[in-house]
Amino acid sequence: MDSYETFEYDVLVIGAGGAGLRAVIAAREAGCSVGVVCKSLLGKAHTVMAEGGVAAALGNMKSPDGMNEPDSWKVHLTDTFKGGAFLNNPRTVEIFAKEAPERVLELEQYGAVFDRTPEGLIAERPFGGHKYRRLNHVGDRTGLELIRTVQDKAVGVGMSVHMEITLTRLLKDGDRVVGAFGYRRDTGKFVVFRAKSIVLATGGWGRMYQFTSNSWEGTGDGLQMAYEAGAELLDMEMIQFHPTGMAWPPGMRGILVTEGVRGEGGILKNNKGERFMFNPDYTPPLYKGQFAETAEEGERWLEDKKNNRRPPELLPRDVVARAIYKEVEAGRGTEHKAVYLDVTHRGAEYIKRKLPSMYEQFHALGAVDITKEAMEVYPTVHYTMGGVWAEPEGCATSVPGLFAAGEVAAGLHGANRLGGNSLSDILVFGKRAGEGAAEFARTAKLGAIDPAQIQAEISVLMHPLELQEGESPYKIHQELQENMQRDCMIARNEQGLNSVLAKILELQTRAAKIKVNGDTAFNPGWHAARDVRFMLRTSEIIVRCALERKESRGAQWRLDYPALDPVWGKKNLIATQDGDKVKITERPLPDMPAELKAIVEEYK
């Protein structure tokens, strides 16, 4: 048996983004000892990349007539259902919409410094799919301020932090999760964490695509550890393609242009200079009559929000992404196969004040001055609505002792996430997951650690170093990205999905023979060998679910099944492990309670 370090906690939190840190605070306030493990450094989570704001219906903004906009949790709930094409779990959405305002005000109490209205209240901005101004923000650095605030609070309540550790397997005692196994990224030394309960808050998995806003950590480790431990995965076909990723210059390809740019008046144009979002074919029936129909009306909205008919650039992300795709496919894109996003008409002073990170980022990294020239943008893989199924009350998964929150969890967003809902999601359900894990730990004992499970994972990790020759993990990753980008992106069809599935299965066979030189110390190729195997399995699940759902709904756009299907609108797809195979089953979507139906009918 190879030697390894061992740590013990009541609650182990895997992931140090907003969801993980909010879970830490909740578990510590419940009296539990808490350990936190992160793949990178504390403070470097994808939460930082959520720039535009945190969605919560505070109703702080006034119309020109001096009256507060009539926002409420009921309107937020309705918008979230509409944005998710009604594939959302009803109870999850209800909890989220009701508790989001309290979590934002709590964040303010922790010390978050928000932008302010003239009355001194938290300022809110418009975002796609939200009926009212609801994005509570700090310029375009809201995620950074959120992570700073909850990190300071988590340090204050006390936690043990383990940075730059990759966990690759959850350890079980019978059906229950009792720990996790992994290694230190610098030395490669193995580490075991024992815990009475575990909170999974590991974020998303966009790195199997060529162009993504996700950084190197987003390889789906947490998702696959849960899957291999027996957890149910829900809605895995639903991948969000954020409509505005940078397309040019090449070095910035895929980098996110926050929706806040459009919220502050940015407009989308094709190569003819037309605001193509005014094309009525791009507005789904559910949103007819709610958006400006002329450029003049859209521009007037920026100054006079009484009629609340927003510019069509603020339609939900899946709608805008498809519109951009269609414009480019029709030959109306830029020479770099993109469209223009122009905010120059707002003036340099306004842009630098409201969008300081966007201005600085593109000026420094791409020599693009957004106060003087339009950006070239195209959809980029950004977020995953699917993930580990977690029940809404305490975020428990189908595996005893395992809880999940944030992007790795599923149920809230349905077929498409509204901008800003991710930050309130991690606050609401990070807290609930921490509380649920603490409650479980209160009556549980540390389980037995099975040496055979550890040895099995060590064998998997060491195998690439033991082969005399074999495949490059980088080559396999490159081929996976190329195929997923081509055949499983915005527009999908059966032929393309079957093609990429065949490629994934081929790559899985080749991945069993990955060869890495050197040893475990300071070896990025060794890290990549395990990451690639996780990404291949996640990609297979995504494609199999996309093939199974024969309709277009939210982020799932099937060219061969272009319409919403009311039958598919009543069920989710569940992926589970069945030996070495992926098992896909259907599950009825929980019925929406009568009181929620009445709210949706009133406000939609």
Image: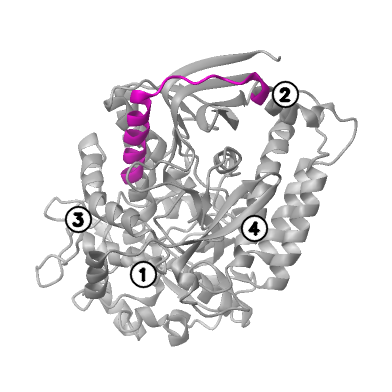
Q: Position of residue 424 (x, y in %)?
A: 33, 49
Q: Which of marks 1 and 3 is in front?
A: 1
Relative vertical location of residue 281 with respect to residue 597 in this rendering, above or below:
below
Spatial CA distance of label 3 from label 4 is 40 Å
Cβ atoms under marks 1 and 4 closer than 8 Å: no
> What is the number of the mark on residue 58?
3
Apparent side of residue 378 relative to residue 281 in the rendered image (left or right): right
Query: Within 10 Å of the Cα at label 4, are there few (<14), some (14-19), or many (20+) other Cα atoms?
Result: few
| Sequence-earlier tag: 1 or 4 | 1
Q: Where is residue 433 in the image (x, y as percent from the top left)?
A: 36, 38
Query: Within 10 Å of the Cα at label 1, are there few (<14), some (14-19), or many (20+) other Cα atoms?
Result: many
Badge 4 amino acid = Pro
Which residue corresponds to mark 4? 250
Spatial CA distance of label 1 from label 4 is 35 Å
Badge 1 amino acid = Lys
Instruction: Place residue 453 in its image quadrant.
Output: top right
Which residue corresponds to mark 2? 520
| Sequence-earlier tag: 1 or 3 | 3
| Sequence-earlier tag: 3 or 4 | 3
Q: Nearer the viewer, mark 1 or mark 2?
A: 1
Badge 2 amino acid = Thr
Label 3 sits on a secondary structure element that is loop
- Residue at image position (18%, 76%) is 306
| Sequence-earlier tag: 4 or 2 | 4
Relative vertical location of residue 6 with respect to residue 470 in this rendering, above or below:
above
Which residue corresponds to mark 1? 82
Label 2 sits on a secondary structure element that is loop
Cβ atoms under marks 1 and 3 closer than 8 Å: no
Which quarter of the figure is the N terminus placed in?
Answer: top right
Residue nearest the viewer, comparing 230 with 146: 230
Query: Which residues fall within the magenta stretch?
Result: 427-453
Magenta stretch contains residue 12: no
